[in-house]
Amino acid sequence: MKYILLFFGIVIVLISCKKAAVIETVDEKDWYLGGSQTFFDQSGGAYSNTFNGLTAAQELIHGVGDKLFESSFVSSPSPINPGLGPIFNAVSCVSCHPSDGRNISPKEGDNIHNLLLRISVPGENEHGGPIAVPNFGLQFQPRAIAGMNSEGNVSVTYTYLQGNFDDGELYELRQPTFTILNSYMSFPSDAMISPRLSRPVFGLGLLEAIPEWALLANQDLFDSNGDGISGKANSVWNVKDQKMSIGRFGWKAGSPTLLQQVGFAFSEDIGLTNFLFPIENNLYNQNLGVQKEISDSLIYSLTFYLKTLGVPAKRNVNDSEVIRGKQLFSEASCVKCHVPKQKTAVNVAFKSISNQTIYPYTDLLLHDMGAGLADNRTEYLADGSEWRTPPLWGIGLTEVVNGHSNFLHDGRARNLTEAILWHGGEAINAKLYFKKLNVKDRAALIKFLKSL
């Protein structure tokens, strides 16, 4: 009798343990998208939290960068913030990245200033990168300082496409067409145009800290496992180190480091020459010599500011609908590109980003997204239909922080559902899976995304 009771006791314990394992579907770490640099902030400032654990000196540098990020520049000569232009896209960083977030898509008929156009002509330069458009450069600048002409104007029109989910519910997508108008000289007919809407700038230091081997480990160049997904790392020119490096930043992973991303933005977006990009943008490509309109220390301060912006925490982790949406996100194979978990390298010199388990939901690799999203412009190894997987952390707070829900590289998607429905290429099966879901499950998947 004693052994029988012992047997049933063991069975009950095993059943109880198994039941607990089934119920325990929430990982406590799910809250901490940015590891130790996660902030439980759901306000309009959710993207603007300073890293934990900074020294007093580091906090000072972060503050200098913060001030610079919000500063407006003016044309020279000026005692404060000189050097703007002569042609440019914006007068400040914050005008493109409001509250450290993303800009809103342009309205039809607007003279576009909240979105920029990368441009190039067919071919590759000496490093395998894009070739500048003669007399226009690598970026179209529709603004100019007083007394100067800009390169022209940009307008957008939208075509509306109708479709339906498998259960019959209708949806509508909008497809933009960007047109260069009133250019100061004839714009080449073979030039390639790629519209780019700004992205949020938080968590970038953590993304930069992911080791190269971890990114390369997710490559599957020849789709050896037959799942239709073959991500690849971009290989781009590192201006400072004068060598090829893995690209991490930008819509096509065209920049290898935050420092280079900052230097290029100052040069192309605002017209401020710097130690990385010392040649002035100007009409007719006149040789104005090597210049440096912003100091090295300010470039590094702004880079450090971007490197030390924390990540908002995940929300509603225990919500049953969010849990269901997370399961569907995985079953749809979205996690094969939007890889949930990464780990940063050990960095004894900067403990704030060292050895952190983070959940950015990206592999930082290039993927073919199909003809619908193609810009048909190459950028190093990225072809005309390939884009870097954007991180999804913080995406659910876009409306709170920036007051809109425009997504994708040109802002065409007006909500997360439309963003999914534009997926093609390597993501076509994930989109078809989403289209087959019933109303309740589609809502659950979207609610999961909004929890990030």
Image: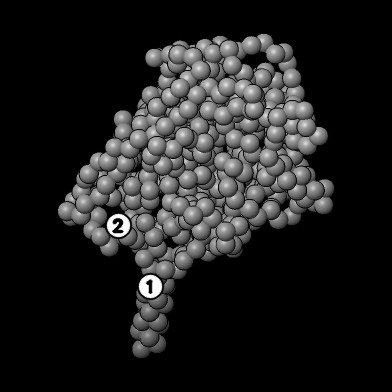
Local crowd size for mark 2, using a 10 Å CA cut-off: few (<14), some (14–19), many (≥20): some
**Residue corresponding to mark 2:** 442
Comparing labels 1 and 2, the label whose residue is closer to the camera: 2
Q: Can residue 165 be seen?
A: no
- Residue found at x 80% / y 48%: 60
In the structure shown, which secondary structural element does the residue marked by tag 1 occupy? helix
- The label on residue 7 is none
Farthest residue in the bottom direction?
Answer: 1
Location of residue 211 (image quadrant): top right
- Residue found at x 53% / y 22%: 151
Name above or below for residue 65 compared with residue 116.
below
Q: Can residue 88 be seen?
A: yes
Give the residue type at disc 1.
Lys
Residue 350, horizontal then vertical, whole percent = 73, 44
Residue 48, horizontal then vertical, whole percent = 63, 53
Name above or below for residue 441 compared with residue 87.
below
Local crowd size for mark 1, using a 10 Å CA cut-off: few (<14), some (14–19), many (≥20): few
Location of residue 247 (image quadrant): top right
How many numbered marks does the figure carry? 2
Horizontally, residue 201 falls left or right of residue 421, namely right
In the structure shown, which secondary structural element does the residue marked by tag 2 occupy? helix
Which colour scheme appears in the figure? one colour
Farthest residue in the left direction?
Answer: 168
Of 361 and 421, which appears nearest the observer? 421
Residue 40, horizontal then vertical, whole percent = 59, 63
**Residue corresponding to mark 1:** 19
- Which image quarter is the N terminus in? bottom left
Residue 332, horizontal then vertical, whole percent = 32, 49
- Residue found at x 63% / y 40%: 93
Give the residue type at disc 2.
Arg
- Residue found at x 44% / y 40%: 106
